[in-house]
Amino acid sequence: MKQTILTGLAAASLVLASGLAFAAGQYGPGVSDTEIKIGQTMPYSGPASALGAIGKAEAAYFAMINDQGGVNGRKINLISRDDSYSPPKTVEVVRKLVEDDQVLLLFNTLGTPPNTAIHRYLNDNKVPQLLVASGADQWNDPRNHPWTTGWPPSYRIEARIYARYILKNLPNAKIAVLYQNDDFGKDYLIGLREGLGNKADKMIVATQTYETTDPMVDSQVVALQGSGADVLLTAAIPKFAAQVIRKAYDIGWKPTHFLTNVSIAIKAVMQPAGPEKCVGIISAGYLKEPSDPQWQDTPEYKEWLAWMKKYNASGSLTDFFAVYGYSAAQLLVAVLKASGDNLTRENVMKQAASIHNLTLPMLLPGITVSTSADDFAPIKQMQLEKFDGTSWKLFDEVISGSGS
């Protein structure tokens, strides 16, 4: 029986493709009558290895699509390779994917530093770098980098949403920021300053950075506590986010804690940190959190659960990353379906930049995917959520950070 999720996505794909006449059988590298070859890098090892669950989920989703006959009769061949979250290794792996494996495109390659390292190479060679698994603002630059699109909401938008909440509810806050010392972390600090406006200099009382090669961040947490801050923004990948939560708890520091969406996974962060130490942490989401009971009687969750049990059985049923990968893969399938038999790199990019109010099953209600020739950011809205020791609970309304 054809799954209802896929029926909905197929209909959406037809909307994407309406009015376009495709010449039959126009193929780019990696495409034949039976196959679409796609490349990817993921941190299956190294400091961000928890995020490798995303790549596993995407491979599992494509396996389901292939079992159902593929995309327009073509099976997706995902070549997903480990780059250890190391930019030099990412460059080496991506060159092989493009030049030796001859992939059609790169999909959901993970991490701001790794993607920054391959950004120019892929654009110079006109290879689509689709749905980058990073919310850095640089992926939305159609004029200068017309072959790259992002996937999650901008980190700066996310930080502006936190700033909006702070100004409304904690107007006298003294804010400390811990961030990764690269474009990933710096985007959060930039967005927070943008959101706070002319109050930023007064309200932000301390900042600390870390490198992904650091063994731990305990000293940074102690220094931030010493600043007298009563609000903490942690812009960190899962390994370091868990350390921050544990250390703050152990030294008795209880700030209002905002945690980047990158690190909300219960299996990768909350469980290692200790769920009781995470109570009250605030983040912002755009996908349905699988631990939240409110979704568990919905058709969308039940479809996701059935897919998890059949195709991604080694994954955790509370793992946000499994929802992340599932949804990103669905969006790529919609783009490929819209491309029809014109599977050139140029046409795939055209379709990726022509998405109009597409609803994906595991997006939060009220959040849709849209792109245009002038705006390559698929998702622009988020909703605040708070961890209660067991699951993330949504509060406030769905908002955009653009006007915060």
Image: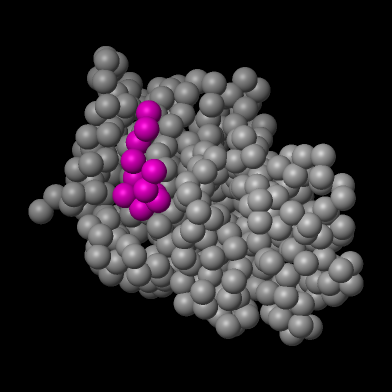
Which quadrant of the structure image shows residue 346?
A: top left
Residue shown at 40% from the left, 57% from the top: 288
Rendered location of residue 355, percent (x, y):
39, 29
Rendered location of residue 402, percent (x, y):
61, 35
The foreground one among 212 and 376 is 376
Rendered location of residue 62, percent (x, y):
33, 51
Please say whether residue 164 is one of the residues in the magenta stretch. no
Tell me if 111 is positioned left or right of 377 in this view.
right
Secondary structure, magenta segment, majority class = loop
Q: Is residue 101 above or below residue 350?
A: below
Tell me if 1 is positioned left or right of 115 in this view.
left
Please say whether residue 363 is one of the residues in the magenta stretch. yes
Q: Is residue 132 above or below residue 206?
A: above
The span shown in magenta is 356-366
Residue shown at 56% from the left, 32% from the top: 148
Q: Residue furthest left?
A: 1
Residue shown at 58% from the left, 59% from the top: 283
Which quadrant of the structure image shows residue 57?
A: bottom left
The foreground one among 215 and 24 is 215
**Residue 39 in view in this figure:** no
